[in-house]
Each structure stands twice: as C-alpha cells, then as structure tokens.
Image (tube, rainbow, N blue to C red):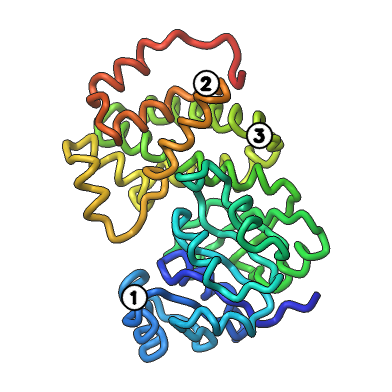
Amino acid sequence: MTIERLAVIGGGAWGTALAQVAAGSGRETLLWVLETEVADSINTIGENSLYLPGVPLSPAIRATNDLGALADCDAWLVVTPAQHMRSVLEQAPHSGKPLVLCSKGIENKTGLMLHHVAAEVCPDSPINVISGPTFAHEVAAAKPTAVTLACANWELGEDLRERIALPSFRIYLTDDITGAEIGGAVKNVLAIACGVVEGSNLGQNARAALIARGFAEMARFGLAHGARLETLTGMAGLGDLVLTCTSTSSRNFSLGKAIAEGRSAKELMSDRRTVAEGAFTAPVLRRIADEQGIDMPIVTAVDDLLAERRSLPEVLEALRTRPPRRTELH
C-alpha cells in the first residue's frame, strides 16, 4: 500500500520527535496532542515548548486536538502513555488503518501486551511495533538512531520503513512483535534498578552486573512468551536496555536514582510531568512472572521498592545474598 500522510498520536517528547522524523523531507504529518497549549505552540512558533523545548520543528508538522482529523491519514504512529492507549484508540476513527505502536509497557489492569490491547480495540487494523534505544531529544535533533520495526506482514513493513526511515533514523525489520514489545517493557523496570545503583553509589561494576542479570530476566520472560532471543539481543532489547540503564536522560533511571537518594517513590510519581512507564509496568510484570513461575528477582525488588513494601537496604541485601544460579538464562 502507499503510505503518504502519517499521523502521530501523542504530543509528548517522544511523539513530537517521531513527528519530526515522519516529516522528514517536508512530508506532511499530523500530530494529535491532548493539550490545547501544545497544539498552539507547535502551530504558531514551530516548537513543542512544553515537552521538547528548544527544538525547531518541521513546518510540515501540523498539530491538532481533534481525533477525528486522523481519519484522513494513511497510518498512525501511536505514542500515548501505555496505560492510556486503550482509551485514546477507543475514541479514534481507526477504520482498519495500520497502527505502529511506539509506547513501551504492559496494560496494568489486564496484564496484556500493548499489541493485544490494540488488536482488541482495532480488530481490523494491522498492528506493528517500533522499539529501540531512543532518547527523544536526540531523535528530534537528527542524531544517528537505530530501531526495530516489528510487523507480521513483511510487505507492509517495507512500506512503513520506506515512509518513516531517514539517514539518521535506521530501521531494522522483524516479524517478532512479541519480542519487540517485551524488550521495551522490561527494560523500563530494569532502568529503575540501575538508577538505584547509581543513586546508592554502588559503582560501575555493580551496574554492569545488574544490566547483565537484568537481561537474563528479560530473556527468561521473553522466551516464555514466544519471543526470539535474536530480537531481545537487538535494538528492541539489549540496545534499549543499555541506553536507559546508563543515563539520567532516562526517566526510569532518574526515578530510581532519586529514590536511592532518599525521596519517596509516591512523591516522585505524583510530581512527574512525564511518565516513567517502568513504575506502572513493574507490578504487572511481577504478577505475571509469579503466576507463570518465571524467576525475576530484580523486577521483584523494584516492585517492592516502588510500593514501599521493603526498604532500600532490605532490597539490596536480598539481591546481594541471593544464591547464584547454575545457568545464565534459565
């Protein structure tokens, strides 16, 4: 199919950065945003002054608060927070249009991966996923970035890649939608743990060990749900894990760091304008893992810390004294 006019649903930093990519070479792009002031800022001064300040946006981007305007677009990039995706899609005129899910998480109430949520709401739409190591400000500034695009239909995947890809935004195709989604969801929780390591001054050795053991948890969970290991070792898994576990530009990493520095998890969550999806993913990920007998001690520790069931010293001691496993992944 020919994909010309793209819509991006969600006007946060990541959605705005993707709109900038989609508008490359002057290609018309519609950006749906929730806040009237954000739409006005984009349309009048060419900048998302609330979520991506200081980044000049392409004049090919037009912002709207009207979900009905999306009906004229050929495909949608869905970049709403994971916990609000269902409600937004229920209000949108999807009519079988291809959807590319660009958010990362698991629906907390149902325990469903986002592509299953989208399939429930939009049963006639082909569901695809973009995931990978992407800080929004770097993507918007056209710094080199590589992502995974997961599509069940290879022809549609090629059409989407041709429409979205730029020299600065490289896209690798896979048909492993489950793997791409699991990598993006689990890494957010692990990034909180790495922020705790940083905020506790435990050192680089500890953080490297946590990333490695965290990847083992990601792989165990992914393989148990039908993901392929090569997907999890690619951009959507290991690549994204390394990025978000090593920088305060990651909202999840920053959340964990602040908790380790003595701030209350509840206070931090209530004060944050932008969403640290790992905080919503941790409890449902733990619940699924416990129900299915998947060993995820780091995820469990993060969930306990966020819910304030155990103190930071108790969580760290439990991880330090845990008996080592015989194998890396199982």
* Amino acid at the residue labelled 1: Gly
Mark 3 / mark 2, whichever is N-terminal: 3
State yes or no: discs 3 and 1 in contact (Cβ < 8 Å).
Answer: no
In the rendered structure, the answer to whether residue 298 lies left or right of residue 129 reads left
Task: Give the residue pinned by disc 3.
Answer: 225
Which quadrant of the structure image shows residue 34? bottom left
> 10 Å neighbourhood of mark 2: few (<14), some, or many (≥20)?
some
* Residue visible at 29% across and 34% down in the picture: 307
Q: Quadrant for residue 237, please give it.
A: top right
Residue 78 coordinates in the image, percent (x, y): 55, 65
Q: Which residue is mark 2?
A: 295
Mark 1 lies on residue: 54
Q: Where on the picture, by quarter, is residue 153?
A: bottom right
Tell me: 113 left or right of 322. Answer: right
Q: Is residue 189 left or right of residue 116?
A: left
- Give the structural element (helix, strand or loop) at label 2: loop
134 versus 266 height, above or below = below
Relative height, residue 16 to residue 274 (above, below): below
Relative vertical location of residue 69 with respect to residue 188 in this rendering, above or below: below
What's the CA distance linking mark 3 and mark 2?
Answer: 14 Å
Instruction: Tell me where residue 23 appears, x and y as whole percent.
Output: 57, 80
User: Residue 91 in the image: x percent, y percent?
Assistant: 52, 71
- Give the alpha-carbon distance from disc 2 to disc 1, as whole Å: 44 Å
- Front label number (3 vs 1): 3
The location of residue 122, given as percent across then percent down, is 65, 63
Which residue sits at x=35%, y=82%? 36
Rendered-image quadrant of the N terminus: bottom right
Residues under labels 3 and 1: Cα distance?
41 Å
Label 1, secondary structure: give it.
Answer: loop
Which numbered disc flags the more N-terminal residue, 3 or 1?
1
Specify the quadrant that holds the C terminus: top right
Helix, strand or loop at label 3? It is loop
